[in-house]
Amino acid sequence: MILSDKAILEGMENGEIVVEPFDRKALGTNSYDVHLSKHLATYQADILDAKAHNTIEHFEIPEEGYVLKPGTVYLGSTLEYTETHAHVPFLEGKSSVGRLGIDIHATAGKGDVGFCNHWTLEISVAQPVRIYAGMPIGQLIYFHVEGDVENYYNKKASAKYNSRSPLPMESMMWKNRF
């Protein structure tokens, strides 16, 4: 079951959902619009290794915007810091962004109950496109969870993305054992 605008507001009032900064105009009928922060990053290596710690280089989107190019994985982050303590958040791209050929996540559109952070975006483009800090980039949709949660994300010892940061975070796949 997807939460309505009123249910999202109720969740915010009782502390189950946190969005900072919150802008009432960003609340849709059944979603909350999130915006691209000024922070971007790219991997330093040409070949990424799933067993290695692939380092990234952070940079900021200038006021005149930044042109994304196909063939590069860009890591971005949401301007908004979010917490979700009783619902499953899903991050989806806005249709206006998709119509520009921008994908905002490769695979990681679902959050976990207990996720407390800025969202890292895995951005790729179909053709060169100029983006700007502060532009609407996606929407959070909240789903009701059936049953009690035993292991909240922010309390899991194995959670790899718990350190609060407005910067995009690189893959932590290398921390897995395989």
Image: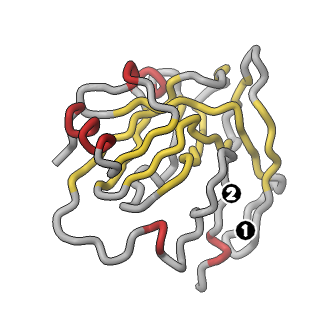
Q: Nearer the viewer, residue 118 or 51?
A: 118
Q: Label 1 belongs to which residue?
A: 49
Q: Label 2 belongs to which residue?
A: 170
Q: Position of residue 170 (x, y in %)?
A: 68, 57
Where is the C terminus found, in terms of image quarters? bottom right
Callout 2 environment at 10 Å: few (<14), some (14 to 19), or many (20+)?
some
Q: Where on the picture, by quarter, is residue 126?
A: top right
Residue at 61% across, 41% down: 77
Q: Position of residue 114 (x, y in %)?
A: 41, 62
Q: Nearer the viewer, residue 31 or 92?
A: 31
Q: Residue furthest bottom?
A: 177
Q: Secondary structure at mark 2?
A: loop
Q: CA distance from mark 2 to mark 1?
A: 12 Å
Q: Position of residue 29 (x, y in %)?
A: 24, 26
As drawn, 160 above or below 127: below
Instruction: Report the side of 164 relative to 72 (left or right).
Output: left
Residue at 79% across, 44% down: 58
Q: Position of residue 19 (x, y in %)?
A: 45, 39
Instruction: Report the side of 137 relative to 142 (left or right).
Output: right
As drawn, 128 above or below 155: above
